[in-house]
Amino acid sequence: MTGGLSEWMIDGKSRYVDLAAHCIGLGRKKPYTRHNNRFYRPYRNYFASGKDHEDWDVMALAGYAERGDANSHGGYMYHMTREGLDWLGEKLGIHIYDEEN
C-alpha cells in the first residue's frame, strides 16, 4: 500500500521513514546487495516511544505499525507490521525481511 501517510518532511527526508528505519535498526546495519537488488534483515523490530508518540499513532492508524504495551517512559512499545515493512522498503528501494512472515 502506498500513500496512507501524509508525510511531513525534515531536511527533505520523511520523519516517518526515519522513525521506521530506526525501529528496525537500519541506521546501524546496512542493506546488502545480491544480483543488483538490495535486501535487509532487521535485527530488531521495536521502538519504545516517550510521551510524544503521535507520529507512531499515525503510522499505527495507517496500518504500518502496531502499538503494544505502555512502557516506563510514559509512551508505548511499537513495532512495524508486514505492510509497514513493505512501505518502508518501497520508500528506500530495498526488500526488508520479516522473521515472522
Image (tube, rainbow, N blue to C red):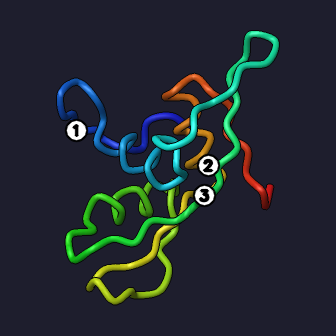
- Which amino acid type is shown beneath numbered disc 3? Thr
Marks 3/1: CA–CA distance:
21 Å
Position of residue 17 measured from the top left corner of the image (x, y, whole percent): 39, 40
Q: Which mark is residue 8?
A: 1
Question: Which structural element holds mark 1?
Answer: loop
Along the viewing direction, whichever of 35 and 59 lies nearer the viewer: 35
Secondary element at tag 3: loop
**Residue at left offset 73%, top offset 44%:** 97
Three-letter amino acid code of the residue under disc 2: Glu
Disc 1 marks which amino acid? Answer: Trp
Cβ atoms at labels 1 and 2 below 8 Å apart: no
Front residue of this view, candidates 68 and 4: 68
| Residue 28 in the image, given as x and y percentages of width and height | 50, 43
Query: Which residue is drawn at the image coordinates 36% and 42% (left, top)?
Result: 18
Q: Which mark is residue 83?
A: 2
Residue 33 drawn above or below residue 101: above
Q: Is residue 66 above or below residue 31?
A: below
Q: Are marks 2 and 3 in contact (CB under 8 Å)?
A: yes
